[in-house]
Image (spheres, rainbow, N blue to C red):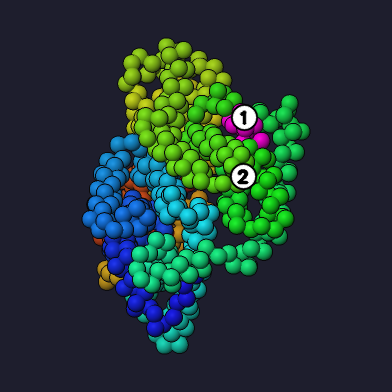
């Protein structure tokens, strides 16, 4: 790896700007966007994810240029142009993807899942680009990227911790800094510093400059495995992976005639096990000790064995409960891994086919109409409609007649598919289900099912009336000149109702606040014939179903007046999810 010293920072930065100009532009755009939106670093928000895609693909285009077109400068700008066109097209897809989902855009929705698959393809392309028809092995490029990622992460985290400690100490000893230094530090370190630092460690594998001898040494240093990593792989990771593989193989052999094909408890572990196994196999490619040699001979065989039986089990599950994108990806990954594993065994540990198969599998999973999400949605929608047709409930594609006589098994079939579609925000793909009945479909279908709020893969099944509202000021300037009392309250499912005796207008009053299905603030006093009820229930109704919002104080201030008594609330935080409710607010009397 290249050493970083203070006297080389400027020259290194210049080299990065001239070598990866488009990538640096995307990095600057990402930093500016985070500052502009004030979103936390790592938020799964469409523009954030889009700029990350731009960073990866623009860096990959530079590596393709260096590999194939080093002497044709115009090709560099053509490749950059293709990247920009792709990013704009994907921006159009993300902006129009709201029609694919029934709620706000999030990570576990159709566009979010597709974006994660695209990330996988982009990363594999980045690693594979320098190795195409060259002396650079795929395992060498992978090792460079692997080391670079962890070194960059280490430097960035240490720098971030140092900045936090410095600012915290300054505030402790002197005075509080008004700016949000924690946010700005995280943005500049993780969105600007970290990506640029990452690029400095990527060598020019095919330099044609006169100092190519020095570059060759740099490449050799980059693909050299540190002793620490060598020992970690040889004596820790390989034995652990061998033990895990042995346990899985023994479990499959013992349960072949029993619960393996029915309970299918390995399905959730398969992807992580196989991916980690391949990563370890790639990293061990250049290690020649006995432990590594035995691992490279035995693990591919064991992996193929595990994957074949798991794919059979997954296929049987698909026949039982239909296709989901998770099972689709497992089958694609399994087929790709078996092909790559067989190639690896018969070609004496050659990994050239692995990235090609991975990219092809990723592209198939992305390309409609055979992609993972299209097939999964159509399959689950078909399962539901088959049951509806069986009971003559589906009048046409847009209308359903309720039927309380649907059998329990068929009700469960409908519920399983609805659970899956709700998780990926695809209930709007059911043309016959009106929006107001999302997640209350039993009222529409005419039978009551036992709702499982924890759907497939453990993702919480959110209710349609969900709201997550917050005040966009950390310390709001609250005008209290017209009021005598102010309270900072937190009420909800986990809090008792509020009751307090206060002095208003020179007289004792009792204030009761109830927050359940309604939001009532009750005021009583000796001189009042009956308690006054200030009804703020409309506030809850107004925010139900509006998703995540960050609003100014003026939008979250509500006032009610009865006779000469005035009550005001200012919401700081409101969360509504199904029957759960919590509100943090200021109460002014």
- Give the overall secondary structure of the magenta segment: helix
**Quarter of the figure with residue 285:** bottom right
Structural crowding at the residue carrying mark 1, measured as other residues with C-alpha within 10 Å and reported as few (<14), some (14–19) or many (≥20): some
Closer to the chain start, of discs 1 and 2, is: 1
Q: Which residues are magenta?
A: 305-314
Left or right: 266 in relation to 258: left
| Residue wearing tag 2 | 348
Q: State the CA–CA distance, disc 1 to disc 2.
A: 30 Å
Q: Residue at x 62, y 55 (%)?
A: 284
| Residue 290 drawn above or below residue 389 | below
Which of 403/121 is in front? 121
Q: In this rendered view, identify the residue nearer to me: 333 or 538.
A: 333
Disc 1 designates what residue? Answer: 313
Does residue 251 appear to the left or right of 7 in the view shown?
right
Q: Position of residue 119 (x, y in %)?
A: 41, 49
Reply above or below: 392 against 328.
above
């Amino acid at each position: 790896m290249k050493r970083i010293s203070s006297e080389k920072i400027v020259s290194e930065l210049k080299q990065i700007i001239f070598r990866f100009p488009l990538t640096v532009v995307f990095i600057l755009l990402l930093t500016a966007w985070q500052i502009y939106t004030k979103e936390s670093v790592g938020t799964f928000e469409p523009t954030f994810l889009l700029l990350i895609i731009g960073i990866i693909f623009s860096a990959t285009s530079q590596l393709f240029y260096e590999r194939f077109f080093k002497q044709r400068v115009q090709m560099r700008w053509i490749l950059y142009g293709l990247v920009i066109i792709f990013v704009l097209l994907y921006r159009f897809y993300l902006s129009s993807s709201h029609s694919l989902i029934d709620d706000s855009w999030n990570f576990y929705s159709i566009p979010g899942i597709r974006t994660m698959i695209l990330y996988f393809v982009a990363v594999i392309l980045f690693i594979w680009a320098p190795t195409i028809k060259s002396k650079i092995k795929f395992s060498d490029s992978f090792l460079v990227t692997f080391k670079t990622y962890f070194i960059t992460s280490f430097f960035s985290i240490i720098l971030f911790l140092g900045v936090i400690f410095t600012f915290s100490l300054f505030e402790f000893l002197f005075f509080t800094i008004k700016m949000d230094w924690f946010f700005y530090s995280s943005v500049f370190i993780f969105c600007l510093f970290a990506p640029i630092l990452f690029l400095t460690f990527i060598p020019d594998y095919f330099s044609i400059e006169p100092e190519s001898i020095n570059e060759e040494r740099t490449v050799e240093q980059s693909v050299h495995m540190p002793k620490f990593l060598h020992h970690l792989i040889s004596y820790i990771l390989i034995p652990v992976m061998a033990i895990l593989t042995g346990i899985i193989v023994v479990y499959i052999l013992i349960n072949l005639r029993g619960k393996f094909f029915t309970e299918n408890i390995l399905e959730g572990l398969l992807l992580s096990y196989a991916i980690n196994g391949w990563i370890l196999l790639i990293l061990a490619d250049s290690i020649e000790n006995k432990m590594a040699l035995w691992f490279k001979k035995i693990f591919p065989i064991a992996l193929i064995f595990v994957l074949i039986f798991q794919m059979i089990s997954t296929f049987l599950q698909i026949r039982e409960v239909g296709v989901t994108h998770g099972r689709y990806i497992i089958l694609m990954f399994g087929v790709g891994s078996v092909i790559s594993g067989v190639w690896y065994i018969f070609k004496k540990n050659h990994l050239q086919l692995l990235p090609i198969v991975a990219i092809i599998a990723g592209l198939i999973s992305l390309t409609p109409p055979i992609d993972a999400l299209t097939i999964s949605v159509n399959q689950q929608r078909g399962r539901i409609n088959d049951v509806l047709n069986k009971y003559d409930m589906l009048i046409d594609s847009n209308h359903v007649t309720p039927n309380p006589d649907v059998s329990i098994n068929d009700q469960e079939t409908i519920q399983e598919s609805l659970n899956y579609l709700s998780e990926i925000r695809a209930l709007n793909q059911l043309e016959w289900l009106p929006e107001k009945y999302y997640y209350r479909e039993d009222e529409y279908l005419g039978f009551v099912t036992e709702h499982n709020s924890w759907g497939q893969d453990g993702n919480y099944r959110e209710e349609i009336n969900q709201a997550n509202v917050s005040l966009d000021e950390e310390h709001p300037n609250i005008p209290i000149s017209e009021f005598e009392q102010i309270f900072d309250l937190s009420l909800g499912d986990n809090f008792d109702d509020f009751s307090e005796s206060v002095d208003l207008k020179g007289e004792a009053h009792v204030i009761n606040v109830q927050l359940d299905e309604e939001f009532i603030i009750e005021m009583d006093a000796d001189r009042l014939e009956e308690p006054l009820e200030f009804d703020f229930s409309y506030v809850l109704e107004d925010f139900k179903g509006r998703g995540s919002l960050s609003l100014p104080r003026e939008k979250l201030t509500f006032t009610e007046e009865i006779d000469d008594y005035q009550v005001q609330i200012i919401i700081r935080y409101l969360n509504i999810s199904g029957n759960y409710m919590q509100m943090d607010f200021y109460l002014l009397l």
